[in-house]
Image (cartoon, coloured by chain):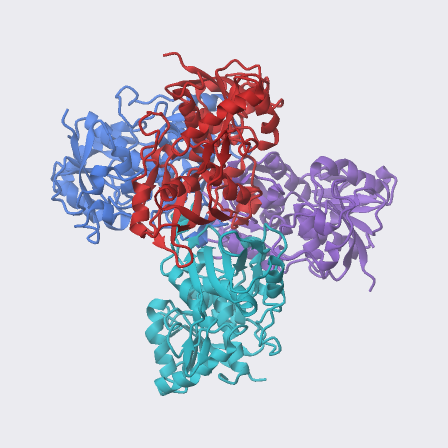
Chain colours: A cyan, B red, C purple, D blue
Amino acid sequence: MKKIRTAILGATGTVGQRMIQLLEGHPWFEISSLAASDNSAGKTYGEAAHWQLETAIPQAIAGMTVEQCRPTLDCDFVLSGLPSSIAGQTETDFASAGYPVISNAGSHRMEPDVPLLIPELNPDHLQAIEKQRERLASKGFIVTNPNCSTIGLVIPLAAIHRKFGLDAVHVVTMQALSGAGYPGVASMDAVDNVLPAIGGEEHKLETEPLKILGNWKNDAFEDAEMRISALTHRVNVRDGHLEACSVKVRKETSPEEVESSLAGFTSPIDDLGLPSAPRPVMILEKDADRPQPRLDRDRAKGMAVIVGPVAPCSVLDFKFRILSHNTIRGAAGAAILNAELLYRKELIG
Amino acid sequence: MKKIRTAILGATGTVGQRMIQLLEGHPWFEISSLAASDNSAGKTYGEAAHWQLETAIPQAIAGMTVEQCRPTLDCDFVLSGLPSSIAGQTETDFASAGYPVISNAGSHRMEPDVPLLIPELNPDHLQAIEKQRERLASKGFIVTNPNCSTIGLVIPLAAIHRKFGLDAVHVVTMQALSGAGYPGVASMDAVDNVLPAIGGEEHKLETEPLKILGNWKNDAFEDAEMRISALTHRVNVRDGHLEACSVKVRKETSPEEVESSLAGFTSPIDDLGLPSAPRPVMILEKDADRPQPRLDRDRAKGMAVIVGPVAPCSVLDFKFRILSHNTIRGAAGAAILNAELLYRKELIG
Amino acid sequence: MKKIRTAILGATGTVGQRMIQLLEGHPWFEISSLAASDNSAGKTYGEAAHWQLETAIPQAIAGMTVEQCRPTLDCDFVLSGLPSSIAGQTETDFASAGYPVISNAGSHRMEPDVPLLIPELNPDHLQAIEKQRERLASKGFIVTNPNCSTIGLVIPLAAIHRKFGLDAVHVVTMQALSGAGYPGVASMDAVDNVLPAIGGEEHKLETEPLKILGNWKNDAFEDAEMRISALTHRVNVRDGHLEACSVKVRKETSPEEVESSLAGFTSPIDDLGLPSAPRPVMILEKDADRPQPRLDRDRAKGMAVIVGPVAPCSVLDFKFRILSHNTIRGAAGAAILNAELLYRKELIG
Amino acid sequence: MKKIRTAILGATGTVGQRMIQLLEGHPWFEISSLAASDNSAGKTYGEAAHWQLETAIPQAIAGMTVEQCRPTLDCDFVLSGLPSSIAGQTETDFASAGYPVISNAGSHRMEPDVPLLIPELNPDHLQAIEKQRERLASKGFIVTNPNCSTIGLVIPLAAIHRKFGLDAVHVVTMQALSGAGYPGVASMDAVDNVLPAIGGEEHKLETEPLKILGNWKNDAFEDAEMRISALTHRVNVRDGHLEACSVKVRKETSPEEVESSLAGFTSPIDDLGLPSAPRPVMILEKDADRPQPRLDRDRAKGMAVIVGPVAPCSVLDFKFRILSHNTIRGAAGAAILNAELLYRKELIG
């Protein structure tokens, strides 16, 4: 089988590095181009990147020459790990030039014809691509994945919403340092401390799930109807976002039944055999002192969402904790899984 | 002025050490006895204690001989920093033998004739002492302070409750390591991690405020009527409990008015001149990225509660963050402040 | 091929857990018994162990019943991860009863007929087993691996010593928390701190290398002749001991030649195909800011020793840094590699 | 008494903030100007500074307008906390314009007529000012303090050198994060990690002590004769540099006598009553597990050097550990103490 040629935008950053790590030995995709800032362009990747991961830079990658982020890359699609500040224009340029763009950036997530995709939840949202292509007058398009803290939250929410209908969601996050990229959070701010109110993050948590859990209907996205309130925090943890979540449901039920809805969740993509799709997508933990970032973030290669026991909440109805690996399930792995779905659907390749 | 002779039970523990530190140079109290486990009894305090604080052991204290926790200590009252496992019986023994016992332990907090005291909030609860003395058939008695995570929470709640009436409170804590005592949390559990569900803590947060905010009426405590839901976590921070709190109020109001109720809070003890009482008891911070444990825990010598900006909550009504120093305002300082009120009320000394 | 039945003593501890993790899917060995304290005996392993590792407990292991540490286990040899306090007698009991004992404990390391084995360095020390068997009047015997901080140090020392002759070694360690076991170091001691002078560790570093680098001659171990001085510290790192080392050599040479001696090191076991043996055993890093615990400890599955660039030392001759994974290369992996050598030499199985 | 008007250069940085904190309530000096980068100039200090310290910004300071670093400030002398990258030219400009410049920067430390001053050790080096003034053709001049890691080291070295003569010094540092300024070290590099080889730091440690312990003779500095070898590391500690030091002395002696030389050290400035001078300048700790950064860095208000027990070293002669607060004794406090000496000597004011 001939592999699909993949370009990575923002290849030297935190998310770009994870994309490279996760694509090593990928059965369908191979990295054909690495692109980054003009600063890095022209250098070998080994020279340009301040590699932050515990596994070594793949040999073949270290020697590749970094290119500029211009829509002349030789590839079948691009994975974008660009920071939002420059993703907006650059990704549009690529899509307009005919490239499928699978993006982790926030810039285009809420656009009315851009899918905010989690393959296990809303693969039908890919229908929006058609409309997007018309707008761009191009065969290219943009598909995005949600913010890292949204992904961990919305997967269990989807399971509960489908069974019992969600009325309200209250979430308090304890997010890992890697979510801020590199250099990101100063060590003097992180040591012996917690940082409240990550910029813009609360708004993302309160709005992105509505789009994801909503429908594509009459050529437009229709938000799910529920209220979400979020309080975010950065804690002194390298990887793994922990979220304390309380929900109010529309249909009376019990903690046991909520747990069953989580444990028994099935997805429309279960039978597609996507290489990065975890089976199951959620792992339910029975111990009250789980999930924990260090012990649980790497389960199912960092692609599963770990949910702790469900307890009654005297203010809303139920409460539980969620953990997901923010740079794998919440970013690089999310984008790759999106690309896998698009390949299966013959939208790339 | 002759100083009041104070004995410290559990003097070698984390709370006991803070009591000693905070009493250094106290205008009213002087330490006359240090008592701890049989293991430590007979040694000098300098030998017996694994001193954990940044300031040195006070010279005079280091040379004192540690005594056993038996009700034969030569003092006017006892401050108890005992762990709950042994506080129950020991404190009862002291009270029955005629000692005023000012306790930080959980054992007697919810007893029907034991005040769960925060001087700024419910000094009238001291009326219960009379009934307690009858039960014990002793002039001795027990007064307790709340759990460390409760104290930071209930002070702002009291201000809001008084003005607008609280219907429901949702709180998610990020608590410091020192709250678990010494050796407490293993470093392997703390590094690069968050530990969910601190044992018993959620129940305390959901019940203690009801007693504190309630009334002493017809010789009994009557709980305040509100629902509280808590999710607790241990984070990699030395001192300072951060809490993310959302509230539903009974009377319509605005974030600005809630902030005013916090900033303008006055207390019945404001004019008593208690040496450890912070003025004001709450400090309102305007920046969304505050309070932070490292930067704010030591304000007003660790006795103030720092509250961040109040924002609308789309699920309940308002949300904000709270920080308090868990071993000062939340434990040793709380007990000392209680003792100061009792002294002013001529219940000790 | 029938697998060799392996019992693990101290199976619930930090080292025991790593042994279990590393033996999952081992080509030669299978775990037949798990033994631990009387406290744990009778429970399933899943119940008895407070599992600390990022990978899950192997399914088959979780359900096994923990046995007592008595020499009646049904196995071909025992791997001991016991704490030193009880390893001394227990291991002797097993050896006397006929079991080969591959131990990570400190108890028997310096005995005159017990090999202190690093397969890459001193496989000929296995000759001492014959003498040991005579003493014990048993076909059983004990083979030990060095202390975790010694292993990382002595492998590069061996390379330099072989080529240039070592006169003096000065080493300052920055050791990981996991080296103290569980619960081990209290988080209050670890956070925002460094702990000097790990108990007994400096003596081990100053003496164990002399035995390892020495010879078995005329039925006795003869120490290598060199002076070693060590200063040890515990730092706030989960895994991976970093050591700053300066050496004085007997034969004049250059930093480049010392680096060559490290990079070009070959071992007598290179051709034995031991499954856990890293190839090469040492990895030389060229960047001055390497090795780093987080980035380098897991290289070669935690079994390699990473050495930074060699620089001239104006007090001794050369200086460089060393990193090794303390619970893999420095403990569980070291013991398993020893067992593999013994199996190849037909001393077990 | 009229206070000396003090300007702070680099007032918004890590060192500048400490200078402001330490000068609050200073008996001799008052802050008359705050200067920083053009970015900050024109703002109030409260707006311009990202305040990092546990104590609040002094009220009067928060409202002051930040000025540019130009030699037109209205003050009697300047304290410079500038980064080295710009300190070189800026400080020369100030000195040439007639200002006494008391600098913490590295730029001018090794110049042949600039004192590298530690008041307790080499106050006679101030003689060099005369020559410097000639060169600059100004009444202004520059006096520097050593690098933060040098200060902690050289104070005990001075005591030993004076009594026994130092032949060689081997030092391995474990340095705090605050030494890198703000934002400084990225949290992703600091968490669960140690960073080797702080840029340029080893060279400073190997050369600055030679100047400090040397003599001003015939209008020139003459280095002390000894060899120093340094290996530096950044550890996950907020404040407090720990150093593991081994020394070779010229005159035979014992660990006890070395300890006596440290404990009994007296300084030429002991009788000058400088407000920031700690008495004694060194504190000798008897416990092998001390000094520790968290427990010992704040002793004597962060101005003392804490030395652990002295032990024999089998490679050199003696070994011991040193701790000093890097932003107080090692930077801001050092500069202020220098200014106090200069005031006493009537070189400023």
How far across and down, in percent of the image, does residue A258 sit? 59, 61
Name the outermost residue toward the right.
C137
How many numbered circles are shown? 0
Is D214 in front, or is C80?
C80
Work out whether D180 lies above or below A87.
above
Side of D91 relative to B260 (left or right): left
Which residue occupies 60% across, 79% down?
Answer: A272
The C terminus of chain D - image quarter: top left
Is B243 in front, or is D31?
B243
Work out whether A272 lies above or below A49.
below
Is D147 in front, or is B235?
B235
Work out whether B247 lies above or below D155.
below
Side of D308 relative to C5 (left or right): left
Name the outermost residue toward the front.
B218
Side of D155 relative to C147 (left or right): left
How far across and down, in percent of the image, does residue B316 sit? 42, 55
How far across and down, in percent of the image, does residue A72 sit? 38, 82
The N terminus of chain D - image quarter: top left
One can see residue C5 in this view: yes
Quarter of the rendering containing residue D243: top left
Is C204 in front, or is B252?
B252
One can see residue D310 in this view: no
Work out whether A44 lies above or below A298.
below
How far across and down, in percent of the image, does residue C248 sit? 53, 42
Which residue occupies 57% across, 21% down?
Answer: B136
